[in-house]
Amino acid sequence: MNLYQIANEYQAILDNTFDHETGEILPQVMDKMDEVTKKIEDKGIAVASYIKNLDAERKAIEDAKKSMADREKSLERRVEWLTNYLQSNMERCGINEIKSPYFGIKLKKCPLSVDIQDENIIPNDYKKIKEIVSIDKLKIKEEILAGVIIPGASLKQNNRLEIR
């Protein structure tokens, strides 16, 4: 039986806890409720164990991704350094091309690009202004808690499951 079915059984027992005529708690129902509560606890422990296993696997994947990203960055920096090393020495020696049976190495001119030495002295005609709008949720929360009604916003209370 899955947790959902056990919870439905618990709810059904809870709905029939009282004698509708006398209003008293039925003793046989309490025994059944204890039994179902034990089932819920056992299932809850099993589900929580599975969650912890999945989370451990997720963390292992996260660590592996970080390790691979670090390795990638290291290789990227090495490629960049070696490329600059080769280029600067070819330029220094006036060599524009090296031929090899495996690949060709050439110094090529890039398209013209703009080099900005000092942003502050560039005329305003050549500057773009970017406006970013963001909502201050902390301020909204404080205002609502203080009794201010803010259209389009309200406070909500969520739950989260904690497994230690």
Image (cartoon, grey):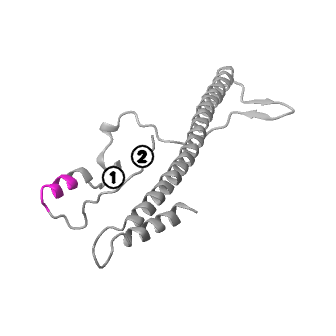
Question: Is 85 located above or below residue 24 in the figure?
Answer: above
- Say whether residue 8 is left or right of residue 64: left
Q: Is residue 148 left or right of residue 15?
A: left
* Image position of 66 (left or right of 118): right
Per the image, the residue denoted by label 1 is 130
Residue 111 versus residue 87 in the image, above or below: below
Residue farthest toward the bottom in the current orientation of the protein: 21
Q: Quadrant of the N terminus?
A: bottom right
In the image, what residue occupies the spot 21% across and 56% down?
140
Residue 100 x, y percent position in the rendering: 84, 30
Of helix, strand and loop, which one carries label 2?
loop
Of mark 1 and mark 2, the one earlier in the sequence is 1
Q: Residue tagged by mark 2? A: 162
- Residue at x-position 29% and y-position 56%: 133
The quadrant of the picture occupied by the C terminus is: top left
Give, as a three-letter code, the residue at label 1: Lys
SS of the residue under disc 1: loop
Q: Which region is colored magenta?
A: 140-148
Residue 119: x, y in percent?
Answer: 34, 38
Report the front residue among 110 and 26: 26
